Amino acid sequence: MSDFIGALWQYAFIQNAVLAGVLSSFACGMTGVYVVVKRITFISGGIAHAVLGGIGIAYYLGLDPLLGAVITALFSAFLLGMINLTARQHEDTVIGALWAVGMAVGIIFITLTPGYSVDLMSFLFGNILMVTKPVLWLLLLLDLIILLLVVVFYRQFLLVCYDEEYARLRGLPVKFLYILLLALIALTVVVLIKVVGLIMVIALLTLPAAVAGLFTHNLRQMMVSATGLSLLFILAGLVISYNLNLPSGATIVIIAGLCYLGAIGFRKLVLKIRRRKEIAFDGGGE
């Protein structure tokens, strides 16, 4: 830990990594809760993996790959949202197709791009240590957009996640809100790409929110808890990966997964103890 703190004061790339972790945790904590509550992890995975197509095309055209990621993510969110609303019976097939085709298109354009780019591989597997100042500014901008949408549409998103039919009866534009929610997830996916990469982005998007959801069902509390847990997982992953010379993205996801399994075990233990106390109390009362 002391080695990491010393490197933090000394090296700019470590400082950038920590800032990226802080910015990513906000987006992950706010949006991941909607993914878990609405149970749209598969749709989120489709969006995440389709993004590789946009990244590959952007690289081939000499454009900023993050720009290609944003455009593709938003387009995929709109497409999957419309399919989910109009053709639910074919939803899984279309998501799987978009998932596979997006990856295939990305691989083809990566192959056609002259030379080999290490930065491109970081989009697949994540490399938070390679985050630059311009990327940090982009992450901040995306964070602000996500925060603005969550604040403005908090109650509407709440109704759409928990009870779509009631939201329709209240006269809310459910289709618009659902696609907007997927757009929110798409932007978060882009934010998390640099942290854990496309391959593992769904794990970091859902696991902190899933852990928070084990102990509270209040949406605001879940968001705060998930944000804190995201930051904890990212910083712990950074420290461990730095000290052991391991890939940072994979380390972060493993820590998140272990904490989720530990949280499930802890919750079961607490519930078992509580039941025993209730049984003892009832027996004593008789």
Image (cartoon, rainbow, N blue to C red):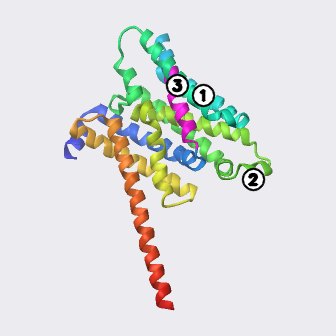
Residue at 55%, 32% (x, y): give it: 46
> What residue lies at 77% left-to-right and 48% top-to-bottom?
168
Upstream in the sequence, badge 1 or badge 2? 1
* Crowd around label 1: few <14 · some 14–19 · many ≥20 (10 Å): many
Q: Which numbered circle lies on residue 100?
A: 3
The answer to whether 264 appears left or right of 1 in the picture is right
Relative to residue 64, is residue 258 depicted above or below? below
- Mark 2: which secondary structure? helix
* Magenta-drawn stretch contains 50: yes
Q: Range of the magenta residues?
A: 40-53
| Disc 1/disc 2 C-alpha distance (Å) | 27 Å
Q: Are marks 2 and 3 in contact (CB under 8 Å)?
A: no
Residue sitting at 40 percent across and 37 percent down?
20
Q: What residue type is labelled 2?
A: Tyr
What is the x, y in percent for residue 283?
A: 48, 87
Q: Tell how many labels.
A: 3
Q: Mark 1 points at which residue?
A: 76
Element under disc 1: helix
Name the residue that disc number 2 marks. Answer: 166
Q: Does the magenta stretch include residue 67?
A: no
- Neighbours of disc 3 within 10 Å: few (<14), some (14-19), many (20+): some
Q: How far apart are marks 2 and 3 (CA)?
A: 35 Å
Q: Main secondary structure of the magenta part?
A: helix
At label 3, which amino acid type do we have?
Answer: Ala
Packing grade of label 2 (10 A; few <14, some 14-19, many >=20) is: few
| Residue nearest the observer in this picture, 194 or 255 | 255
Q: Nearer the viewer, residue 152 or 280?
A: 280
Query: Which label was assigned to residue 108?
Result: none
